[in-house]
Structure formats: structure tokens, C-alpha cells
């Protein structure tokens, strides 16, 4: 046995977690698996044979498994933990165990997926969003008899199979769904809470929203929402790079005035863009690198702009990311043209014949501001208002949802601890309205509990 693994593992939560940790730090099986791994996967899939697949994907099945926490000795050896400086006394030892494993049972969501399609055959197993098996069978099995990267999976899969069998026995007996609904810990549940209720418990959250949002900007933003539609604003027949940079500068200066960390004094609009934008501008300024390099265009020439804008070979960059940030924590100022989606909007029935004919004749450019995250939405609003006040045609993405957030009139989604708090919109029924913020519940649960509307788990069914 390798020094990184124990001699044996039991079906107790600490052992399951130890093995799962191997996958979090990169100890994973290869895509092309060994026969030994597939022989270990097969009993798990067989134990789920009569479980009905998920409603939205017939290749996927999921089920809750319940694993006992075991004894304190399963958690760890006192003398060993003491020698490593993790604990000093048996009292600390017991306290730490109870803090990490407060309940006698720990719950895990097990998800498996499989297909035997000729073009793409695979088997996958994940536990609490941790990928345990990702087996591409299209190229057959690995000729190696034993891969070190498969050891954690080989030890974990039999334990998972034993636990799955217990859940399936409950499902066949008709007790599983009721048991889950009554006993599933809140850390694993989805729920909804009104933002105003959340503000009652966390008033600092409300304060942080309005810290850089003046009453004047808020009122102008609110008034503008009646016309926040690309077919209710004008168009720019002629457009240049300088028009884009000027709009950016309006936003930067507005954010600086609002108290954000922008410094615009003595800078030209282009210099501001080069300082605060993402930098991958697809050859717009001539300052990019790699996929985004190029000689730049004439900032005053509409023909040069049209040529660059409609160049189908232009890709790979973020020219519209005017306030750089992460995947969901940046602000974009998109330049749009009716040639992009007017035809699609018409064919899909989103606009009338009259609107289609009007914008087909009067087509042109307009702006769209986008920045929905909690940390950047006030900057987005400052951009939007300042550009609109200057007379440019502009909309703001999800403007009504941002306004509801500012007014505390929307709901906030509560997601299980195992999921990130991003891209969770599809997890919640439409009846709760548009939700743009999602949280985990860690602190103050007892205060929040009466305010939370928990969403029932989707029941598992037999074929």
C-alpha cells in the first residue's frame, strides 16, 4: 500500500472525506481507464439499474447517500494529532471531531452518468460535485494493469456501492423520499429568502449597495427603466472607435465621481481604456498581444471601425470588457448593431412586423452596459446613466433585476454548500421571479430559518 493511503477504509464519513480529498488535489483516474477500475465501477451502476434517470437528462442519475460519522477513532488518532500540533488535549480532540462531524450521519449527493453511444461511450461518477471517475471508453481500456492515479477511486467505489444499496432499498420500500424531505440537512437544500428579510439580519449588505450610489444616479436609473429596450432607443448610423472610447470615458469619470478607484485626471479617453479595460482588444488599439495583436485602426474613420467590427476573423479577446475583473465580476460596454440579431428577433417572434421594418431601414449602432454582480452593478449603473445622459443610445442588461435588488424587492437564492454561488438561475422555479444573487447559509441560521422558503427535493423514482 502506498504511504499516502491507509491500509483499509470503512464506510464512515471521515474515510469517505479522506478519499475525496485525493481528487480535490489532483489524484484522479485517467480518462482512458483500466479494466480494474471499470470492474469496480460496474457494481455501482448495477445497484442503480432500476433508478429512473433525471427528468432533464436521461443519461444521468442521482441519489442521496447517508454515511455514519463513525467513532472518534475513525476521525483520527489522538496521539498522532497531538504530535502534529493539531490538538493539545483530549477535550480539544473531541471538540474538533464534533465541530467537523456534528451529526451522526453525513449526507452526500451521488451523481452517475453513462452512455454507450458509438461515438462517445463513457462512465462518470461524482460525489458532492467532486469528480471521482471520468472514464472515456471510446478508445478502449488502458493496457496498464494498475495506475496509481486510480487507487483512490478503487478504494472509494466499493464504499459508495454499499451506501447506494441502502438508499435504493429505502426507495424500493417507499420510505426514501419522505426520509430525505424530513431529514436532509439545510446545508444541502435549495431555498429562497426575500432580500428585505436578508437585510434585516445583515444590514451591512444594504449599506454596501448604496455606498457609491447617489440619490441622483439612482433616480435617473429608475426613470430610465421604462425605456430600457433596444427597440425603444435610437441608433448611431455612423460610428468610430473614438465614439466607443468617449462612452468609456463617461463611465470611468462617473465612477470616479461616485467614489470608486478610478483616476481620470489628465488622461485621454483612449488612455483610460488602456488603463482600466481588459487589454485583449482584438487589434482595436494596436496594443494587444497574441490572438489580440494587430496594428490598430484609425480612431476617427467610420469605415475602419465597420471593417474591424464586422470582421468575422476577429475573435478570442474581450474588447468590450471595459472594467476588467473575473468571469462574473467585470463591467462590459458592448457595441451592438442591428445586423447582429434583428433578423433573429423577428423570426423568433420577439418583435412585430412594424418594428422589424423600422429597424431594418434605420439600422445602426447602440451600446449595452453589462455588469450584474453584487460588486460591480453600481459601476454598471453609473456607466449607463452617464452614457445615456450624454445622448448616446444605450441599454443596460438585466436593468429591472438590478433595480429590484437596489429596492430590496427581489428574492435571493440559497444554494447547497457543495455548489458555487454563480450561474444558479436555472435551479429555481420561475414563480420566485428573476434572481441574480445566490448565497450559502453559514451564520445566523436560527434567525434566517423562519424567513426561508425551502424548495422540496425532486423525488427519486423507480423505473
Image (cartoon, rainbow, N blue to C red):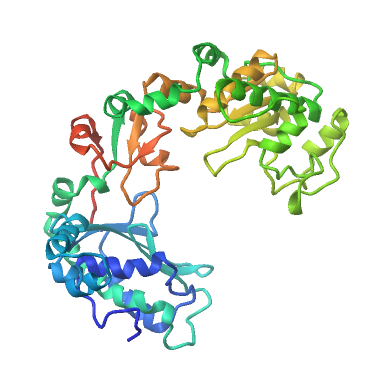
Quick one: 53 or 37, which is closer to the camera? Answer: 37
User: Residue, x 62% and y 34% (percent of image)?
Assistant: 332
Q: Quadrant of residue 110?
A: bottom left
Relative to 295, is 172 above or below?
below
| Percent position of residue 463, x then y | 26, 58
| Percent position of residue 242, x then y | 80, 27
User: Residue, x 22% and y 74% (percent of image)?
Assistant: 80
| Percent position of residue 61, x then y | 33, 59
> Is 198 on the left or on the right of 265, as rendered?
left
User: Residue, x 76% and y 51% (percent of image)?
Assistant: 289
Q: In which quarter of the image is residue 84?
A: bottom left
Quick one: 277 or 343, which is closer to the camera? Answer: 277
Residue 274 visible here: yes
Relative to 269, is 418 above or below?
below
Relative to 88, is 281 above or below?
above
User: Residue, x 40% and y 83% (percent of image)?
Assistant: 35
Q: Identify the image quadrant of the N terminus.
A: bottom left
| Percent position of residue 189, x then y | 26, 45
> Is 334 on the left or on the right of 3, as rendered?
right
> Is 347 on the left or on the right of 158, as rendered?
right
Residue 230 visible here: no
Q: How many labels does the image show?
A: 0
Quick one: 205 or 302, which is closer to the camera? Answer: 205
> Is 29 on the left or on the right of 367, as rendered?
left
Amino acid at each position: 500500500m502506498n504511504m499516502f493511503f491507509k491500509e483499509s477504509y470503512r464506510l464512515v464519513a471521515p474515510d469517505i472525506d479522506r478519499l475525496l480529498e485525493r481528487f480535490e488535489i489532483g489524484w484522479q483516474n485517467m480518462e482512458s481507464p483500466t479494466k480494474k477500475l471499470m470492474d469496480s465501477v460496474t457494481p455501482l451502476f448495477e445497484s442503480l439499474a432500476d433508478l429512473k434517470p433525471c427528468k432533464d437528462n436521461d443519461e444521468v442519475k442521482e441519489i442521496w447517500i447517508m454515511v455514519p460519522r463513525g467513532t472518534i477513532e475513525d476521525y483520527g488518532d489522538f496521539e498522532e494529532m497531538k504530535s502534529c500540533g493539531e490538538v493539545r488535549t483530549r477535550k480539544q480532540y473531541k471538540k474538533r471531531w464534533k465541530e467537523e462531524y456534528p451529526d451522526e450521519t453525513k449526507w452526500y449527493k451521488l451523481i452517475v452518468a453513462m452512455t454507450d453511444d458509438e461515438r462517445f461511450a463513457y462512465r462518470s461518477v461524482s460525489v458532492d460535485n467532486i469528480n471521482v471517475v471520468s472514464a472515456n471508453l471510446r478508445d478502449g481500456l488502458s493496457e496498464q494493469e494498475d495506475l496509481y492515479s486510480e487507487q483512490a477511486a478503487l478504494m472509494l467505489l466499493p464504499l459508495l456501492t454499499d451506501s447506494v444499496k441502502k438508499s435504493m432499498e429505502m426507495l424500493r420500500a417507499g420510505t426514501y423520499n419522505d426520509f430525505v424531505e424530513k431529514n436532509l440537512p439545510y446545508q444541502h437544500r435549495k431555498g429562497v429568502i426575500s432580500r428585505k428579510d436578508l437585510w434585516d439580519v445583515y444590514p451591512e449588505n444594504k449599506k454596501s449597495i448604496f455606498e457609491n450610489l447617489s440619490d441622483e444616479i439612482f433616480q435617473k436609473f429608475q426613470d430610465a427603466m421604462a425605456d430600457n429596450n433596444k427597440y425603444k432607443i435610437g441608433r448611431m448610423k455612423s460610428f468610430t472607435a473614438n465614439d466607443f472610447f468617449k462612452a468609456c470615458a463617461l463611465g470611468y469619470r462617473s465612477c470616479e465621481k461616485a467614489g470608486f478607484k478610478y483616476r481620470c485626471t489628465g488622461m485621454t479617453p483612449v488612455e483610460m481604456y488602456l488603463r482600466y479595460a481588459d487589454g485583449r482588444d482584438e487589434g482595436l488599439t494596436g496594443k494587444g498581444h497574441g490572438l489580440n495583436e494587430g496594428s490598430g485602426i484609425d480612431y476617427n474613420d467610420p469605415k475602419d471601425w465597420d471593417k474591424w467590427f464586422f470582421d468575422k476573423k476577429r475573435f478570442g479577446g474581450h474588447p468590450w470588457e471595459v472594467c476588467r475583473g473575473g468571469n462574473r465580476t467585470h463591467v462590459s460596454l458592448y457595441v451592438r448593431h442591428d445586423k447582429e440579431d434583428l433578423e433573429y428577433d423577428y423570426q423568433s417572434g420577439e418583435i412585430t412586423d412594424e418594428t422589424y421594418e423600422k429597424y431594418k431601414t434605420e439600422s445602426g449602432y447602440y451600446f449595452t452596459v453589462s455588469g450584474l454582480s453584487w460588486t460591480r452593478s453600481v459601476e454598471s449603473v453609473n456607466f449607463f446613466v452617464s452614457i445615456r445622459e450624454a445622448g448616446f443610445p444605450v441599454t443596460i442588461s438585466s436593468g429591472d433585476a438590478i433595480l429590484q435588488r437596489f429596492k430590496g424587492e427581489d428574492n435571493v437564492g440559497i444554494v447547497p454548500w457543495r455548489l458555487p454561488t454563480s450561474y444558479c438561475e436555472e435551479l429555481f422555479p420561475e414563480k420566485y421571479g428573476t434572481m441574480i444573487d445566490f448565497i450559502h447559509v453559514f451564520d445566523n441560521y436560527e434567525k434566517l430559518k423562519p424567513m426561508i422558503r425551502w424548495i422540496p427535493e425532486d423525488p427519486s423514482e423507480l423505473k
